[in-house]
Image (tube, rainbow, N blue to C red):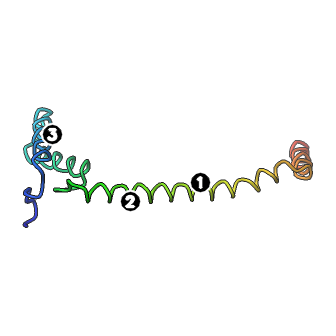
Amino acid sequence: MPRGDKSAYTDKQKRQAEHIEESELDQGRSREAAERIAWATVNKQDGGGKKSGAGRKTAKKATKKATRKATAKKAVKAATKKAPAKKAAKTPATRKTTKKAAKKTSRD
């Protein structure tokens, strides 16, 4: 399949691209720019050519699941890093040193 061949797209994707292209032409874009923007938009929305069917949904779910896991790991990691810093800020020794530092600064 040569580059730029649109045979790998569904009829719905082709209709969407055509509608987007017309909209871009109405906004004053050139024919080439309008077509480029239209197909780029369809690719961004659907991820490329024909991908309908059961296989696509499982791949999407797997990606969603992996993203959710990664986000949860990051949240746990961030929470564990912040906890010791909060405890250190609450200790009386730290407060005293902060007050001393503030007094020194005000004297200078």
- First reached walking from the N terminus: tag 1 or tag 3: 3
- First reached walking from the N terminus: tag 2 or tag 3: 3
Q: In the current view of this chain or complex, which residue is farthest to the front?
A: 54
At 13% from the left edge and 39% from the top edge, which residue is drawn? 29
Relative horizontal placement of residue 80, taking residue 17 as reference (left or right): right
Relative horizontal placement of residue 70, taking residue 31 as reference (left or right): right
Neighbourhood count class around disc 2 (C-alpha, 10 Å): few under 14, some 14–19, many 20 upward = few
At 14% from the left edge and 42% from the top edge, which residue is drawn? 16
Q: Which mark is residue 62?
A: 2
Q: Residue 20 carries which label?
A: 3
Give the Cα distance between marks 2 and 3: 30 Å
Front of the two marks 2 and 3: 2
Type of amino acid at the residue the image marks with label 1: Ala
Q: Which of 100 and 32 lies nearest the eye of the viewer?
A: 32
Q: Is mark 1 on a helix, strand or loop?
A: helix
Q: What element carries label 2?
A: helix
Type of amino acid at the residue the image marks with label 3: Ile
Front of the two marks 1 and 2: 2
Give the Cα distance between marks 1 and 2: 20 Å
Provide residue 41's location: percent of width, then percent of height.
22, 46
At 12% from the left edge and 51% from the top edge, which residue is drawn? 10
